[in-house]
Image: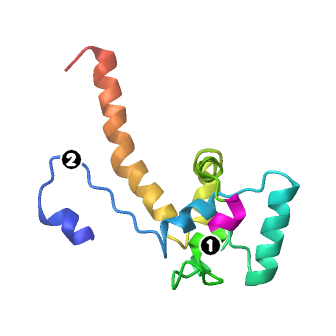
Amino acid sequence: MEQARQDSPWPFEVLLGVAHPMRECWVLAGFVPEGKQEEASLAALRKELGFDPAARSHELDASSNTAKKSPKRVLDRITGGEHEREARCWTEPDLGHLRQRGSDNGLAAFLSEVEARLVPVFSDAAFKDDSGAE
């Protein structure tokens, strides 16, 4: 992927991100139980899987959506299938939490890409807007 980014001069920043094994693992990395029901669901999953799927989401596999270690199944069970709850896994935890839990599933690397390549673009644009230039 890095080669594809470097093969041509792009007129825009190209970010690389690969969720291992699926994007649901990135969402699980941000999961923090809200209340006793979610704590119980997480505890049951820990017992069933033999590990904490939020802390070690990279150990899940994507062989089938109904498989015991399916990231899709685990996420659905832990969030009750609620899309708003899933979104809070992205928006509420601080970046340090996401980087730590995402160190082995590709999320931390993607956040570093965003920080290194995308944030400066918006910072430069904001500076230009504030200065009255272009």
Under mark 2, the amino acid is: Phe
Under mark 1, the amino acid is: Arg
The image quadrant of residue 6 is bottom left
Indicate the quadrant containing the C terminus: top left, top right, bottom left or bottom right: top left
* Nearer to me, 82 or 7: 82
Q: Image check: 15 left or right of 78?
A: left
Which tag is nearer the camera, tag 1 or tag 2?
1
Q: Which mark, by number, is residue 84?
A: none
Residue at screen point 73% across, 82% down: 49
* Rendered view: 91 above or below 127: below
Query: Which percent across, then down, holds residue 63?
Result: 51, 85
CA gap between label 1 and label 2 equals 36 Å
Query: Which percent across, then down, holds residue 71?
Result: 58, 73
Query: How many neighbours does mark 2 have within 10 angstroms: few (below 14), some (14-19), or many (20 or more)?
Result: few
User: Which residue was labeled with disc 2?
Assistant: 12
User: Which residue was labeled with disc 1?
Assistant: 73
* Rendered view: 118 above or below 123: below
* Nearer to me, 33 or 126: 33
Q: Image check: 5 left or right of 120?
A: left
The image quadrant of residue 32 is bottom right
| Magenta-highlighted residues | 75-80
